[in-house]
């Protein structure tokens, strides 16, 4: 799980999430608060309407399920999927 959350954080950075949010998420992972780090990434990606690709969404979904997070807490990110990003 630690590898997956770190991958999600790195992907979020590449997609344009702010450095401060990335630092905060990494700190949460260091303190074994991976679920809260995931929530932070989800919330901030949505708040700033950062376009995501399908792979990023699938990684979010996979980790959310491992944390037993209800779908309603991340499924709204589907609105932000830009299928053109998958070509890069």
Image: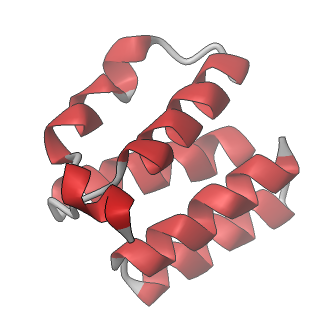
Q: Check the image and report above or below for 17 versus 60.
A: below
Q: Give the side of residue 41 with respect to residue 6, left or right.
A: left
Name the foreground residue: 77 vs 39: 77
Q: Residue at x 27, y 38 (%)?
A: 77
Where on the picture, by quarter, is residue 65? top right
Where on the picture, by quarter, is residue 8? bottom right
Q: Quadrant of the C terminus?
A: bottom left
**Residue 33 visible in the shown view:** no
**Residue 4 visible in the shown view:** yes
Residue 49 coordinates in the image, percent (x, y): 15, 59
Residue 66 coordinates in the image, percent (x, y): 72, 21
- How many numbered marks are there? 0
Residue 14 coordinates in the image, percent (x, y): 46, 79
Where on the picture, by quarter, is residue 24? bottom right
Q: Quadrant of the N terminus?
A: top right
Q: Give the side of residue 15 with respect to residue 50, left or right.
A: right
Q: Give the side of residue 24 with respect to residue 1, left or right.
A: left
Residue 53 coordinates in the image, percent (x, y): 35, 53
Name the foreground residue: 36 vs 72: 72
For the rendered model, the colour scheme is secondary structure
Q: Check the image and report above or below for 34 versus 21.
A: above
Residue furthest to the front in view is 87
Q: Residue at x 50, y 35 (%)?
A: 58
Q: Residue at x 60, y 52 (%)?
A: 37
């Amino acid at each position: 799980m630690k590898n997956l959350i770190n991958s999600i954080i790195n992907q979020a950075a590449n997609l344009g999430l702010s450095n401060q949010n990335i630092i905060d998420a990494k700190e949460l992972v260091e303190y074994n608060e991976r679920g809260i780090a995931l929530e932070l990434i989800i919330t901030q990606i949505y708040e700033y309407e950062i376009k995501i690709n399908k792979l990023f969404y699938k990684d979010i979904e996979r980790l959310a399920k491992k944390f037993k997070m209800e779908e309603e807490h991340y499924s709204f990110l589907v609105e932000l999927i830009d299928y053109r990003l998958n070509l890069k």
